[in-house]
Image (cartoon, rainbow, N blue to C red):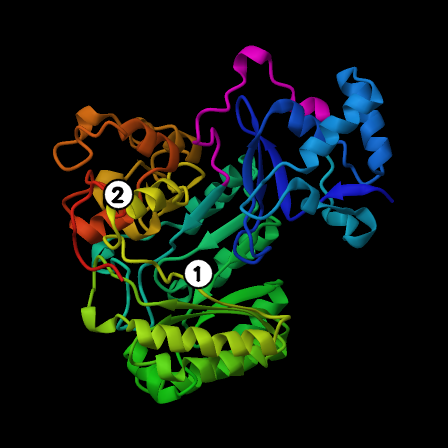
Amino acid sequence: MGLILNPEVKLRMDGGRSILFSVNSVDGAEETVFTFLYPQQAMMLSLFDGERALPEVIKAAACLFNLDEEAASREVEALLDFMVSKNQTIRSLIIDASTIDLSKARVYDPYDFIVPQEYINMTDVRCRIPCSLIILPTMRCFTNCIYCYADRAGIQRQEEFSLGLYKRLLQEMKECEIETVDFSGGDFFCRDDAFDIIECTLSEDMYPTIPTKYPLSKIDVDRLARMGLSTIQISIDALSPDIIDKMVGKPSYGGKILKTLEYLGEAGIRVRTNTVLTPYNIGDAINLARHLAQKPHIFKCNFTPYGRSLYRHDNSLFCSSADLDNFERALKHVQDEFPHKTIYLSGTNIDPYGGDKDKRSSAFWERAMCTANRRGAVVLPNGKVTICEELYFHEYFIIGDLTKQTLMEVWNSPRALELAHPTPSAVLDGSCKDCPDFRRCHEERGRCVRDTLKAYGYNKPHWPDARCPRAPVGNRMV
C-alpha cells in the first residue's frame, strides 16, 4: 500500500483556500493541527491517497501541474516540510496506509480544491465555514463546586433547546463537515434526554466528547457502552473522598464518583480526567495522579490550577507558586514512571501584568491566536450562540439564535462579522480606542475577551487584552 494523510486530520475547502485541521481536538493527538492551505497545496496533498508511494506522488504532481519531475519533487518536499502546528509538519501527518483502518481513510479528489486565481484569499483568519462547535445542553449541575467558573445564574427560568433542534443542528454541522460534537456547560447528564442526545449523535457517525461529574451507576455506564460511546471525561479533584466532597460541595459524593471510574473501566469505556488544583486538594493531587495513571482505561489526565472566574471568584482558591512548583516536580516523576500515559499540567499562566514593558510587548505579539468566532462558536442551552464558552449569556457577544436561524446564518450574521472585524470607532474608551496597532492586534492574533472581562469587569467588553503592554493593571488573574 502507499502513503495517506492521517485520518485524524481533515482537508476541506474554505472559500478561496482550503483548511487542514484536527477532526477531534479533545481525544486526538496531543498537538492540534490547523492551517490554511493554498489551492495548489491542497491539490498536491490529496495525491497521498493510500495507493501511491512518494515517487508516484511526485509523478502525479508533475502531471497535475505540468512540471518536470525534478521541479515536482521540490514542490512535494516543500509541502511535506510545511508547518501545520508549533512542532508538526505535514510530513508527520503522512502515514503508511497499511497502518490504519481503511474504513476510516479519507481520499480526496485534487480537482475539488481548484480555486480561480481571482478568488484566492489567504488573508482573512476567520473561516468561511466553522470547523468546530461547542454545545452547552444545560447549565444545571449535580454538584456545587467551590471553583465553578460557569454562569449558572444566567440560565435560570430559561428553557433548554429541544432534542428536535439538536437533531437539526447535527445535520447542519455535517453540512459544514464537522465530525466531533464538543459538549460542555453544566452537567450533561442533568438533562432527562441526555442518553437520547448521545444516541442520535452516534447514529449520525459523529463523535461526542462529554465531560461530566455525574456519579453514573453501573446500569448507566453499561447503557453507554451498548450505545457505542468509546470515551468520556470525568472531572475528579482528589483521591480522598472527603476532599472530593469538600471540593464539589456534595456530601457522600466522593466514593460514588470513584466507583463510576471503576464501572467505566469494566465496561471498556476509555476515560480522560480533569482536575482543578486549589490549596484544598493540591496536597492529595499527586496521589490522584498516580492512582489514575495505574488504570489501563484512563488514557489522559489534565491538572489545571484554579483561575479567576467571572461569576464565582474567590482569591483564596489560587495556589501558591511554591505549591505549584512542588506539584510540578512530583508530577514529573509520575510522567516518567508512566510514559505511555498523557499526564500534564496546563493553565499555569504567567501574571499578565508582570515583567518590564519590553518583555510584555514581546510576549504579547507572540501570544497564541484566539480562535473564538474564527474557527467555531458556542451554542448556549437556550439556543443562542456566543463566541466563547466562558462568556455565556453576555449580550455583547451573542451572534445569533438557532431557534430562529440556521448555523450558517448565525455564522455569517452581522454581529458575528462585526465582532470578527471590529473598528476603532466602535470602542467607547480604554487603551484600544486610539491604539496605532488596533488592526494588527484584532485582525491577526485577536484579544482574549474572556480575560478582558475577568481583568476589567463585565461592563468592559471593548477593553484590551490584559496581556497588552498598553493595558492597565486589573484584577488578579493567577
Q: Is residue 236 above or below residue 163?
A: below
Coordinates of residue 413 in the picture (x, y in percent): 34, 28
Q: Residue at x 64, y 73 (%)?
A: 268
Q: Which residues are magenta?
A: 109-131
The answer to whether residue 420 is seen in the rendering is no
Whether the magenta-drawn stretch holds residue 441 is answered as: no
Image quadrant occupied by the N terminus: top right
Q: Nearer the viewer, residue 308 or 50?
A: 308
Q: What secondary structure is the magenta-colored segment mainly?
A: loop
Coordinates of residue 179 in the picture (x, y in percent): 57, 46
Q: Which residue is mark 1?
A: 193
- Foreground label between 1 and 2: 2
Coordinates of residue 84 in the picture (x, y in percent): 58, 40
Secondary structure found at label 1: loop
Image quadrant occupied by the C terminus: bottom left
The residue type indicated by label 2 comes to Cys
**What is the crowding at mark 1: few (fewer than 14 residues within 10 Å), some, or many (at least 20)?**
some
Q: Which residue is mark 2?
A: 468
Q: Is residue 319 above or below residue 463?
A: below
The residue type indicated by label 1 comes to Asp
Q: Nearer the viewer, residue 166 or 24?
A: 24
Considering only order in the chain, which callout, 2 or 1, is on the residue closer to the N terminus? 1
**What is the crowding at mark 2: few (fewer than 14 residues within 10 Å), some, or many (at least 20)?**
many
